[in-house]
Image (cartoon, rainbow, N blue to C red):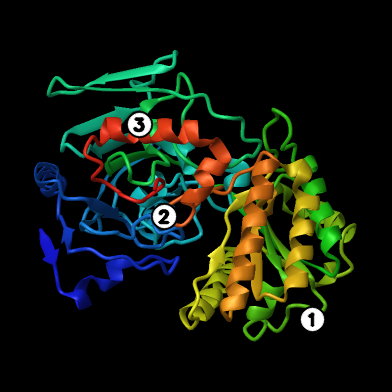
């Protein structure tokens, strides 16, 4: 067990990528699960609040402690078992996502959901039900979790396997623990959220697996220590495009038409010999301007760019390439400037291109006296275009400094506003409130993938209502009767 107390040793643990600052008395770094269990038992016995820390890459302050102690999972970083026949991998929660990806790739497999931040820990990915660009085809991390080991705030260990645990089909849940105690709570009926992605609050549905309650719970119910994932064989080939558009509305029409062509709205499988992307990513003009010095080949008249990837078989490469280029020409006069990636080197360049944008934004934020105001909003595909254009109109009139990218295949927007003075900070918060409230009114969510954390707590009640949020709090207390773990995350 490593213990850090000096401020210069612990200050990096007291923030995350949101730039929210917190405080803690000490930082504990257990080297194995048994040390973690004993530490949590001590916290329970002595009524010490604690916050679990992953890689610190979160954007909503979930790992930022507001008092008590912080427990880092960084040493719980072993890959325990890989089974290529069953297509599973069993890992500890502190495994870095890039290390997991590299390990799987060397064995011809991959974990389909791909959160943008490759330095994140897989335990944090599960705690937030992270997703990423490939969610358009593959869904979120929840869909690939087969088993969890969780340490409850009392120090008891739960091993949850998807085949063996489910909640009751009625609205009441009861779980008997090894010490003879019970965890009981009511399952509220949540309003229907009309989006393909949502991580706001607890995942609660009658008949759900208990496992799913912990996925997306943001470290408020227990500490995830081990995870078994389902993995898939790597596709034979991947075709990539970065497409530039001189007209924004035509780019949005391109996305709509591409969704339809990919049969996203019916029960059919994705097909590799038709337009059937695994990701549809959007980058706005302001974001392109941030990286123009590194990529001068970006057309100067580009209003935005869209990044596409599709898996396919080598035998249809020429046919598929022609199919896509013909499709692209219908929507942009800049089709001749389209970038194409076929081999691994070209795909890495595309990923670096996309990854450089948030890095440049972070550089601006780090020099600012104001906190970045960032959104994680998603709405239904059919209302997305009008909603997005309304947002741009408000931003254009405001004169604010902003950058937008997102998983537009899922109608999912990441708006990043960086105020330059107090007046802009107030205006940015007004526009952000409109942005979130309108999305909720349209049946959408304020949190498509990053969670609620400590920065977006006020929107949880706006989305679900006080009665349901109170029932979620009761569920937390059922697992954490002393309210010690993750205080201030998700709930006030």
Horizontal and vertical percent position of residue 101: 42, 55
Give the residue number, with chain letter if any, for mark 3: 474
Q: Contact (CB < 8 A) between labels 1 and 2?
A: no
Q: Secondary structure at mark 3?
A: helix
Front residue of 437/84: it is 437
Q: Secondary structure at mark 2?
A: loop
Q: Contact (CB < 8 A) between labels 3 and 2?
A: no
Mark 1 vs 2, N-terminal side: 1
Q: CA distance from mark 1 to mark 3?
A: 54 Å
Query: Which residue is depicted at the point 62% across and 56% down?
Result: 433
Give the residue number, with chain letter if any, for mark 2: 454
For the image, the number of numbered tags is: 3
- Res. 8 image quadrant: bottom left
Residue 207 position (above or below residue 191): above
Residue 240 position (above or below residue 229): below
Foreground label between 1 and 3: 3
Give the crowd class for mark 3: few <14, some 14-19, many >=20 residues within 10 Å: some
Horizontal and vertical percent position of residue 408: 68, 53
- On screen, residue 196 versus residue 13, left or right, reads right
Q: CA distance from mark 1 to mark 2?
A: 39 Å
Query: Which residue is depicted at the point 27% across and 52% down?
Result: 52
Q: Is residue 128 visible?
A: yes
Q: Which mark is residue 300?
A: 1
């Amino acid at each position: 067990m490593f213990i850090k107390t000096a401020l210069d040793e612990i200050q990096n643990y007291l923030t995350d990528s949101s730039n929210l600052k917190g405080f803690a008395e000490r930082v504990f770094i257990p080297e194995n699960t048994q040390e973690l269990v004993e530490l949590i038992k001590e916290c329970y016995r002595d009524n010490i609040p604690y916050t679990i820390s992953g890689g610190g890459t979160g954007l909503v302050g979930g790992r930022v402690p507001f008092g008590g102690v912080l427990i880092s999972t960084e040493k719980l970083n072993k890959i325990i078992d890989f089974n290529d026949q069953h297509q599973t991998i069993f890992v500890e929660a502190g495994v870095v996502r890039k290390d997991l990806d590299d390990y799987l790739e060397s064995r011809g497999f991959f974990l389909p959901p791909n959160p943008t931040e490759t330095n994140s820990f897989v335990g944090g990915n599960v705690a937030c039900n992270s997703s990423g660009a490939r969610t358009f085809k593959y869904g979120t991390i929840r869909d690939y979790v087969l088993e969890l080991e969780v340490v409850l705030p009392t120090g008891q260990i739960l091993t949850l396997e998807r085949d063996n645990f489910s909640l009751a089909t009625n609205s009441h849940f009861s779980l008997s623990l090894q010490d003879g105690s019970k965890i009981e709570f009511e399952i509220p009926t949540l309003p229907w959220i009309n989006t393909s992605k949502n991580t706001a609050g607890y995942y609660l549905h009658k008949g759900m697996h208990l496992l799913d309650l912990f996925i997306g719970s943001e470290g408020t119910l227990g500490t995830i220590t081990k995870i078994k994932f389902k993995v898939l064989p790597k596709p034979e080939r991947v075709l990539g495009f970065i497409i530039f558009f001189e007209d924004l509305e035509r780019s949005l029409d391109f996305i709509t038409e591409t969704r339809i062509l990919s049969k996203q709205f019916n029960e059919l499988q994705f097909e590799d010999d038709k337009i059937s992307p695994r990701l549809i990513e959007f980058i706005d003009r302001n974001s392109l301007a941030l990286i123009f010095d590194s990529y001068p080949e970006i057309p100067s008249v580009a209003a935005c760019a869209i990044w596409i990837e599709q898996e396919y078989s080598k035998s249809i490469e020429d046919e598929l390439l022609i199919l896509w280029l013909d499709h692209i020409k219908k929507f942009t006069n800049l089709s001749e400037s389209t970038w194409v990636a076929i081999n691994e080197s070209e795909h890495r360049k595309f990923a670096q291109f996309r990854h450089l944008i948030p890095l440049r934004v972070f550089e601006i934020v780090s020099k600012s006296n104001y906190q970045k105001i960032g959104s994680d909003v998603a709405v239904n595909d059919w209302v997305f275009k009008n909603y997005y254009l309304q947002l741009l109109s408000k931003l254009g009139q405001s004169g604010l400094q902003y950058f937008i990218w997102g998983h537009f295949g899922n109608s999912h927007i990441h708006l990043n506003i960086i105020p330059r003075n107090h007046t802009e900070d107030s205006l940015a918060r007004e526009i952000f409130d409109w942005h979130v409230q309108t999305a909720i009114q349209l049946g959408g969510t304020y949190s498509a993938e990053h969670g609620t954390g400590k920065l977006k707590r006020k929107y949880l009640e706006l989305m679900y209502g006080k009665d349901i949020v109170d029932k979620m709090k009761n569920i937390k207390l059922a697992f954490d009767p002393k309210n010690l773990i993750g205080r201030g995350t998700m709930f006030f």
